[in-house]
């Protein structure tokens, strides 16, 4: 699976959009970009994933660059409950065993 | 909304003792996983399980560890002889097919004294 690079920490004001970047310059054609988050010591929570098109769900939007070498997770209106560590993970989709390799992620602090 | 459950939430044991951590994956899921997270460190993959057998395991998953799906609902992780360094949060996860996202349980905090 391709390696990802994320900033160690970010701050965001409550109510504003949080934009979390991720670099994955060695991503291959069959690899998806997945985002998870971990609030305090809870189990990681799936947020969103994509292959090459931008994706949106009720939690967030995922913007993937045309060359697929980087992506941005957008939380449109961050709340205090969005304070968490956010993980960008690249892995193959169909045909893979699916085990996730977590990095250190980005610690997002949403401030009032 | 269906969810992965884990019991117990906290287990304290003496070094050298056997522990069994229990998980109930989401009912129609076919792929099962165990991860662990030592305090302050990354979430680490331990093992994946599909079709009643281990499909992949990490270097951490040595002979002291085993997994089992004893019936149609439970998925267990056994540590045969616990060491101090086994103290960690253990997370179970499941998914229902290849390429789909994994759903994690709340974790079991294992403390080895």
Image: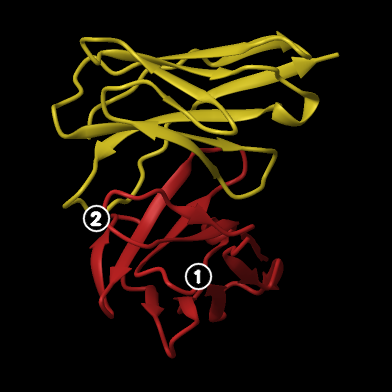
Chain colours: A yellow, B red
Q: Could you say which disc has been placed on residue B81 in the image?
A: none
The residue where tag 2 is placed is: A97
Q: Is residue B109 above or below residue B14?
A: above
Read off the residue under disc 1: B25
Viewer-side residue, A66 vs B87 = A66
Where does the image place residue B9, in percent across and percent down from the top left?
A: 71, 66
Residue B86, percent from left and from top:
53, 60
Outermost residue, right side: A112
**Residue B98 shows in this picture:** yes
> Which residue shows up at 61% across the image and 68% down it?
B5
Q: Please indicate whether residue A42 sits to the left or right of residue B29 in the image.
A: right
Which picture quadrant has residue A107? top right
Residue sitting at x 76%, y 23%: A79
Q: Residue at x 43, y 47 (%)?
A: B44
The answer to whether tags 1 and 2 share a subunit is: no
Instruction: Name the foreground residue: A85 vs B1.
Output: B1
Q: Which of the chains bears the disc numbered 1?
A: B
Q: Which residue is at 50% across, 81% downward? A: B74
Is residue B99 depicted above or below A40 in this figure? Answer: below
Q: Quadrant of the N terminus of chain B?
A: bottom right
Tags 1 and 2 touching, CB below 8 Å: no
Callout 1: SS:
loop
10 Å crowding of disc 1: few (<14), some (14-19), many (20+): many
Where is residue B49 shown, x and y percent of the image? 31, 69
Which quadrant of the figure has residue A26? top left
For this view, does A90 lie left or right of residue A102? Answer: left
Which percent across, then down, holds residue A41? Answer: 67, 45
Disc 2 chain ID? A
Residue A79 vs residue B44: left or right?
A: right
Give the quadrant of the C terminus of chain B: bottom right
Question: Which element type, helix, strand or loop, lies under badge 2?
Answer: loop
Is there any visible trace of residue A34 in the rendered image?
Answer: no
């Amino acid at each position: 699976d391709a390696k990802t690079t994320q900033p160690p920490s970010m701050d965001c004001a409550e109510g504003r959009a949080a934009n979390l970047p991720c670099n994955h310059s060695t991503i291959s054609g069959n690899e998806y970009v997945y985002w998870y988050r971990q609030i305090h010591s809870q189990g990681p929570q799936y947020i969103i994933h994509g292959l090459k098109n931008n994706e949106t769900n009720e939690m967030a939007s995922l913007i993937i660059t045309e060359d697929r070498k980087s992506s941005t997770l957008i939380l449109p209106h961050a709340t205090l409950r969005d304070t968490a560590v956010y993980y960008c993970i690249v892995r193959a989709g169909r045909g893979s065993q699916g085990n996730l390799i977590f990095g250190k992620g980005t610690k997002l602090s949403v401030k009032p | 909304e269906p969810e992965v459950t884990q019991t117990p939430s906290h287990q304290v044991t003496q070094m050298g003792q056997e522990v069994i951590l229990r998980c109930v994956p989401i009912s129609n899921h076919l792929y099962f996983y165990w991860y662990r997270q030592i305090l302050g460190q990354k979430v680490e993959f331990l093992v994946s399980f599909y079709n009643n057998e281990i499909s992949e395991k990490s270097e951490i998953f040595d002979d002291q560890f085993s997994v089992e799906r004893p019936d149609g609902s439970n998925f267990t992780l056994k540590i045969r002889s616990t060491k101090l360094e086994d103290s960690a949060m253990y997370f179970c996860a499941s998914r229902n097919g290849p390429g789909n996202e994994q759903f994690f349980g709340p974790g079991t905090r294992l403390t080895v004294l």
